[in-house]
Image (spheres, rainbow, N blue to C red):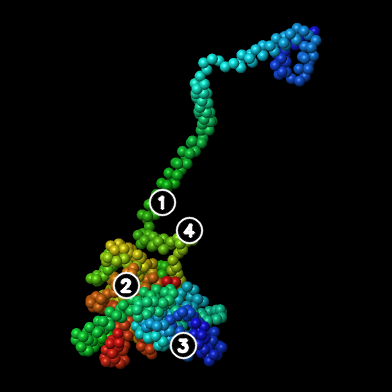
């Protein structure tokens, strides 16, 4: 670990002592399956702005898979205690396929606004939260629920690769090309909004608040049956979602996520977020999910958003034995989900390959798995 | 010469006279034959009574006697208790008053709980119960609480960055301007942005969190 840290901090010698104090401290566990073999902070800078110091950090890390298994995903934890006590960030890379002893890049671009009189020493610490391998085993402290996030992404990746391969088998390369182009079109049509979130706070809107019932999009194979729910809506704010769900499978469930679609007065729909819940739900058992958070969709010019309706759907379920349920490609093909759901990490990666290298490269990539 | 009276002579004969009186009366008796004879007569009578009482009466039933004694003792104890109860009537009354006070407190608490339940809006009640549900006892004497939300922290996802703002201090994770940027929000306290890194081609997800997950 020390040698890794020393290597990572070598560029300090070349950047000079003025900037050396603001470089991040990279701290990986002794038995970490990844090691830092190079780090480049080339375009990083620190400038005074009023009574504060602005740190622009651009880290290009080169990591090596020092384990014997292929790495599918990794999450690095970024903390800046003197700026945001208790708050933190993370950088996750999914849809990887890193063989043992191969290297792979990882970029972290962050900006830190901190008081001038802040304590000396590294203002940013970078640590490892988790690594997922191809056999779905996991390494790491998992402080940010990375195991679930990375495993969910890997399940989606396997589902999507299988689906795209089946398209090639059924309709040839042209069928795959049509599907990829449709996916790209949906991405462009999908509304994208800025969002602010505060937990435990009160509504800041002057508009009267009303309680709106959830409508539910019921997916046929979902192990969870949403029974009912409501949230409070005021103008462009939505808060305090409350949902009731029932386990209709024959296996106990420990984690669920309900997708939350909002609709404005013009009938435009967008995915606002997800309501996750860790629970212990036996077969046939019901449970309530409550969250005391407020979402606000600020308007950057144009017509202010006015939320009128809400729809919920089960977006993922984790059973007590660690296996997952995710919506099938057929579920995602329903018009309402197709309008709002973003493609999976893997689908987005495959689209990028198609954009940059064309269809043959995409098919070659699919054939790797 | 004045003779001691009959009582003093009887006390001297029984050895019950005080020291000074005994000296005086003894001095008189030693010189008075009439009084000495009286003393002798009293002593003889005393010895006769002692002899008579030393012999037990015939046909004495010891079991009956023991039963009568036990009954008398129990009767005495019961009478003593009755008298003690009669002397302390306040004790019984205060015990009764204690139960009444407890009943009044229970009724008042029940009325308060019902009034609170009726008057508190359903949503606030649910959140109160939810908050109480998040508090759990780890071990005896130690209260373990899930990390509380900090209302001073605002998480924001915009087209260019992901920000964690707290009292004018900001931690931002930057991402490229792109059509393929996807914003995700978890109501448990995180906001994320997913994009494809143009240089590496990797699918990267940045997230900021308002507390320990």
Residue furthest toward the left? A171
Q: Distance between the Cα atoms at labels 4 and 2?
A: 35 Å
Query: Mark 1 and mark 3 in contact (Cβ < 8 Å)?
Result: no
Q: Which residue is mark 1?
A: B112
A274 horizontally vs B17: left or right: left
* Residue B36 percent coordinates (x, y): 75, 10
Residue at coordinates 30% horizontally, 87% vertically from top-left?
A368
**Residue under mark 2: which chain is it in?**
A
* Rendered position, B54 above or below B162: above
Quadrant of image for the C terminus of chain A = bottom left
Query: Mark 3 and mark 2 in contact (Cβ < 8 Å)?
Result: no
* Residue B146 percent coordinates (x, y): 44, 66
Q: Which residue is mark 4?
A: B140
* Rendered position, A95 above or below A259: below
Same subunit, labels 3 and 1: the answer reads no
Query: Mark 4 and mark 1 in contact (Cβ < 8 Å)?
Result: no
Residue at coordinates 28% horizontally, 87% vertically from top-left?
A367
Query: Mark 1 and mark 2 in contact (Cβ < 8 Å)?
Result: no
Q: Specify the label residue A37 is tagged with.
A: 3
Q: Distance between the Cα atoms at labels 3 and 1?
A: 66 Å
Q: Which residue is mark 2?
A: A323
Q: Distance between the Cα atoms at labels 4 and 3?
A: 48 Å
- Disc 2 is placed on an element classified as loop
- Disc 1 is placed on an element classified as helix
**Residue under mark 1: which chain is it in?**
B
Q: Single out the mark in the foreground, 2 or 1.
A: 2
Q: Single out the mark in the foreground, 4 or 2.
A: 2
Of B180 and B117, the residue lying toward us = B180
């Amino acid at each position: 670990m020390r040698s890794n840290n020393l290597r990572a901090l070598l560029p300090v010698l070349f950047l000079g002592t003025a900037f050396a104090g603001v470089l991040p401290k990279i701290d990986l566990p002794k038995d970490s399956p990844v090691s830092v073999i190079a780090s480049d902070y080339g375009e990083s800078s620190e400038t005074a702005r009023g009574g504060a110091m602005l740190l622009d950090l651009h880290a290009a890390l080169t990591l090596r898979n020092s384990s014997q298994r292929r790495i599918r995903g990794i999450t690095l934890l970024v903390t800046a205690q003197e700026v945001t006590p208790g708050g933190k960030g993370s950088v996750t890379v999914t849809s990887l396929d890193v063989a043992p002893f191969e290297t792979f890049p990882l970029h972290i671009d962050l900006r830190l606004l901190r008081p001038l009189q802040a304590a000396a020493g590294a203002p940013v610490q970078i640590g490892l939260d988790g690594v997922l391998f191809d056999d779905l085993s996991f390494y790491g402290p998992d402080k940010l629920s990375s195991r679930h996030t990375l495993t969910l992404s890997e399940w989606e990746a396997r589902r999507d690769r299988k689906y795209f391969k089946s398209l090639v088998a059924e309709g040839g390369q042209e069928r795959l090309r049509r599907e990829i182009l449709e996916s790209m079109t949906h991405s462009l049509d999908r509304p994208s909004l800025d969002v602010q979130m505060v937990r435990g706070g009160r509504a800041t809107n002057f508009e009267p608040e009303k309680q709106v019932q959830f409508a539910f999009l019921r997916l046929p194979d979902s192990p969870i049956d949403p029974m009912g729910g409501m949230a409070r809506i005021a103008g462009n704010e939505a808060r305090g979602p409350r949902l009731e769900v029932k386990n209709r499978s024959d296996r106990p469930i420990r984690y669920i996520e309900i997708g939350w679609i909002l609709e404005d007065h013009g009938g435009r729909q967008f995915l606002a977020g997800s309501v996750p819940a860790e629970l212990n739900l036996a077969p046939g058992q019901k449970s309530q999910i409550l969250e005391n958070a407020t979402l606000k969709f600020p308007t950057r010019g144009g017509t202010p958003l006015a939320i009128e309706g809400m729809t919920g759907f089960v977006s993922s379920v984790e059973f007590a034995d660690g296996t997952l349920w995710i919506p099938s490609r057929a579920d995602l093909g329903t018009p309402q989900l197709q309008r709002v759901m973003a493609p999976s990490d893997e689908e987005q990666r495959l689209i990028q390959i198609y954009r940059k290298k064309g269809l043959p490269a995409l098919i070659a990539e699919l054939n790797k798995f | 010469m004045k003779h001691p009276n009959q009582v003093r002579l009887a006390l001297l004969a029984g050895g019950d006279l005080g020291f000074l009186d005994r000296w005086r009366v003894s001095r008189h008796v030693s010189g008075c034959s009439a009084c000495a004879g009286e003393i002798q007569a009293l002593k003889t009578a005393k010895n006769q009574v002692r002899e008579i009482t030393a012999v037990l009466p015939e046909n004495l039933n010891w079991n009956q006697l023991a039963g009568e004694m036990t009954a008398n003792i129990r009767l005495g104890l019961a009478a003593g208790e009755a008298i003690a109860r009669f002397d302390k009537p306040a004790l019984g009354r205060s015990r009764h008053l204690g139960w009444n006070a407890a009943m009044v407190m229970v009724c008042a608490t029940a009325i308060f709980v019902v009034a609170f339940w009726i008057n508190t809006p359903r949503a606030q009640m649910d959140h109160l119960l939810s908050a109480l549900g998040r508090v759990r006892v780890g071990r005896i004497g130690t209260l373990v609480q899930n990390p509380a939300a900090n209302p001073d922290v605002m998480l924001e996802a915009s087209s260019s960055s992901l920000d964690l703002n707290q009292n004018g201090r900001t931690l931002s994770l930057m991402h490229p301007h792109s059509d393929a940027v996807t914003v995700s929000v978890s109501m448990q306290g995180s906001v994320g942005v997913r994009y494809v890194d143009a240089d590496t081609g990797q699918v990267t997800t940045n997230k900021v969190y308002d507390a320990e997950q």
